[in-house]
Amino acid sequence: MPHYEPSVSRETPSVPQAQPYGDTPIAAAAERASQVLTPGGTGTLPRPARPRIMTVANQKGGVGKTTSAVNLAAGLAIHGLGVLVIDLDPQGNASTALGIDHRQPGIASVYEMLLDDVSLRDAIQRSPANERLYCVPSTLDLAGAEIELVSVVARESRLRNALDHDVLAELGIDYVLIDCPPSLGLLTVNAMVAAREVLIPIQCEYYALEGVGQLLRNIELVQAHLNKELHVSTILLTMYDGRTKLADQVAAEVRGHFGDKVLSTIIPRSVKVSEAPGFGMTIIEYDPGSRGSMSYLDASRELAQRAAVEGGLA
């Protein structure tokens, strides 16, 4: 029987070529972060003809409302626009995310501003994250404000009357984002009376549209009786998980219902986005190269550029 020797290749074994540094996920994130953190690296956005005052509202908790408010604000600010966040939630999470110390005794907050004890100029603070980003902080005192305001004259218009447009012009404010509590009480009504636009974050999960119908009915009531200019201008899809069909179904349903009011940018579910407020930061400051940061930057650009297309610019 013939004997066969196993064939042995004498060719030099191929060595896997090292990928260019920029092709690795870490390098790509680092490159994106560098662009974000470089002054002017993200470009500038067109300024509106007058400050856009937007209420960020959804009475359903856990939909990314505060997260969206602060990160959109940071995204607009890093593009060169002046932004003021008014924290109208007694929990004060927006103040925390913007690095504002709102727990020290005697701080001037939105509570005192609603009661006419302090002016907007006294209550406003600059965020350490960006020189163009400002905040009127919230304190736990705000939890009792709805009861205290019940007997006050024109209680639904307290916030609108407190918004000093001379101060906004002096500070170069282009956007005012009002972060509402997860309820449809008097504080949220104040936000709607003070604003011209409503931005509704909707999570890409089951029961996404639950409660939105009631919110829309409340907006209609405010339109009819207190603020004729108020309208829903923007819907932002949040907490998108691309691994599930449900997320795509919810996104399609929301787009089918609200049409072009829905931003094309979708915010993905991200652990980093959830971690950032614990460090007193927005995701753009905490992890600028992450998917969450890039998504909020894209959403902020889309928000500003839509205004330009619709003719809301000087």
Image (spheres, rainbow, N blue to C red):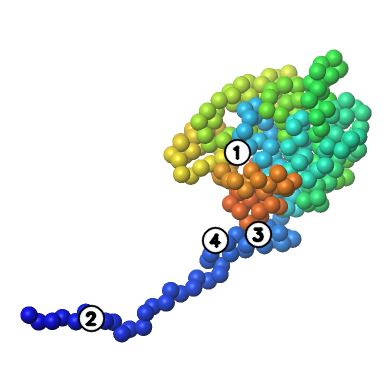
Residue 25, which numbered label?
Answer: 4
Image quadrant in which you'd find residue 95 = top right
| Mark found first going from the N terminus, 1 or 2 | 2
* Quarter of the figure with residue 33: bottom right
Q: Where 248 falls versus 31 (above or below)?
A: above
**What amino acid is at disc 4?**
Pro
Residue drawn 85% across and 34% down? 109
Helix, strand or loop under label 3 = helix
How far apart marks 1 and 3 lie (CA) works out to 23 Å
Between disc 4 and disc 2, the foreground one is 2
**Of all residues shown, which one is farthest toward the left?**
1
Q: In whole angstroms, how far apart are the C-alphas of marks 1 and 2?
A: 63 Å
Q: Is residue 83 visible?
A: no
Say which amino acid is labelled 3: Ala
* Measured Cα–Cα span from mark 4 to mark 1: 27 Å
State which tag comes first along the sequence, 4 or 2. Answer: 2
Q: Which residue is mark 2?
A: 7
Question: Measured along the vertical axis of the image, is residue 40 above or below residue 10?
Answer: above
Residue 264 shown left or right of residue 118 in the figure: left
Q: CA distance from mark 4 to mark 3?
A: 12 Å
* Neighbours of disc 1 within 10 Å: few (<14), some (14-19), many (20+): many
Q: Mark 3, mark 2: which one is toward the viewer?
A: 2
Discs 4/3, front: 4
The amino acid at mark 1 is Leu
Label whose residue precedes the other's in the sequence (4 or 3): 4
Q: CA distance from mark 3 to mark 2?
A: 52 Å
Question: Disc 1 designates what residue?
Answer: 236
The answer to whether the residue labelled 4 contacts the one labelled 2, judged by CB atoms less than 8 Å apart, is no
* Residue 56 image offset from top left, x and y in percent: 69, 34
